[in-house]
Image (cartoon, helix red, strand yellow):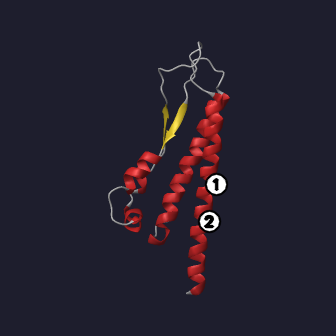
Amino acid sequence: MVLSGAYNYINVLDKAADASWTRNDVLANNIANADTPNYKRKDVQFETYLSNAIAGTDTLDETVANIDLSTLEATTYTEQSNLSYRMDGNNVDISTENVELAKNQIRYYVLMNSINNEFSQLKTALRTS
């Protein structure tokens, strides 16, 4: 995290990329435990925190400048712990996990591309100064 106003978007994108990385680990763990009796699927909560942080202001620039980055921490939770798809108590659906993993990988690559674009814009601005 860089503590400068010029890096506000980069800091938020960095938090989102960290959450995506965490989600990748959690999804991989779900897949690895698809046959473990009584294992319950886990997921990561982040998007709701980000939505709440950017809601209710006039401009996105103002919002991003005033976001408290400490509130943008991904949390892992157990999803529907009382639900089970099988007799052994496991609630992991391998097809769903694979789809979520692919979706998350795309999200991560988009975030990395966005961070690179932000740095490219800063580099261009510095070059023209």
Which quadrant holds residue 64?
bottom left
Does 82 sit above or below residue 42? above
Q: Residue furthest bottom?
A: 129
| Label 2 – label 1 distance at C-alpha | 10 Å
Q: Residue furthest top?
A: 87
Q: Which mark is residue 109?
A: 1
Does 121 sit above or below residue 50? below
Quarter of the rendering occupied by the C terminus? bottom right
Q: For mark 2, does the 10 Å Cα neighbourhood hold few (<14), some (14 to 19), or many (20 or more) residues?
A: few
| N-terminal label among 2 and 1 | 1
Look at the numbered discs 2 and 1 and tell me whether their residues touch, using CB distance below 8 Å: no
User: Does 116 sit left or right of 6 as displayed?
Assistant: right
Q: Position of residue 107 (x, y in %)?
A: 59, 51
In this figure, which residue is indicated by the disc labeled 2? 116
Mark 2 belongs to which amino acid?
Answer: Asn
Q: Can residue 83 be spotted in the picture?
A: yes
Element on which disc 1 rests: helix
Which quadrant holds residue 59?
bottom left
Mark 1 belongs to which amino acid?
Answer: Tyr
Residue visible at 51% across and 40% down in the picture: 44
Residue visible at 61% across and 72% down in the picture: 120
